[in-house]
Image (spheres, rainbow, N blue to C red):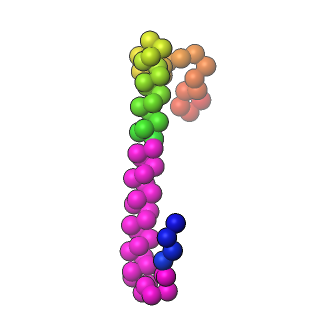
Amino acid sequence: MPTFDLSTYNLAELKGLEFDVRQEIKARQQQEVSKAREQILGIAREAGLSERELLDLPGRRKPGG
C-alpha cells in the first residue's frame, strides 16, 4: 500500500481527506452488501426458491423478535 506524508497537509485538507475516505468506505460497503445479496439470491434461484420464499423460511428471526 502506498504511504503518504500527511505532515504536509493542513488541517482543512486532512479533514477533507477524512471526509472523502469515509464516503469511499460507505460506498464500498454498500457495493459489498449488494454483491453478497445478489450471490445469495442467485443461489436461492438455483435451488428453486423465490426471494419471498427465501425470506419466509422457518426459523428465520423476525425483526424485533
Q: Position of residue 37 (x, y in %)?
A: 44, 33
Q: Determine which quarter of the picture holds residue 34.
A: top left
Give me the residue at 45% from left, 41% from top: 33
- Of the 4 image quadrants, the one containing the C terminus is top right
Give me the residue at 42% from left, 38% from top: 35
Q: Is residue 16 visible?
A: yes
Relative to 5, say whether 35 is above or below. above
Q: Is residue 53 visible?
A: no
Q: Main secondary structure of the magenta part?
A: helix
Residue 45 is one of the magenta-drawn residues: no
Q: Residue furthest top?
A: 48
Query: Tag count in the figure?
Result: 0
| Left or right relative to 45: residue 3 | right
Q: Position of residue 17 (x, y in %)?
A: 41, 73
Residue 28 is one of the magenta-drawn residues: yes
Give me the residue at 43% from left, 85% from top: 9
Give me the residue at 44% from left, 71% from top: 18
Relative to 63, say whether 54 is above or below. above
Q: Position of residue 7 (x, y in %)?
A: 49, 86
Q: Determine which quarter of the picture holds residue 32.
A: top left
Judge by depth and name the residue closer to the eye, 25 or 42. Answer: 42
| Left or right relative to 40: residue 64 | right
Judge by depth and name the residue closer to the eye, 40 or 3. Answer: 3
Magenta residues span: 5-32
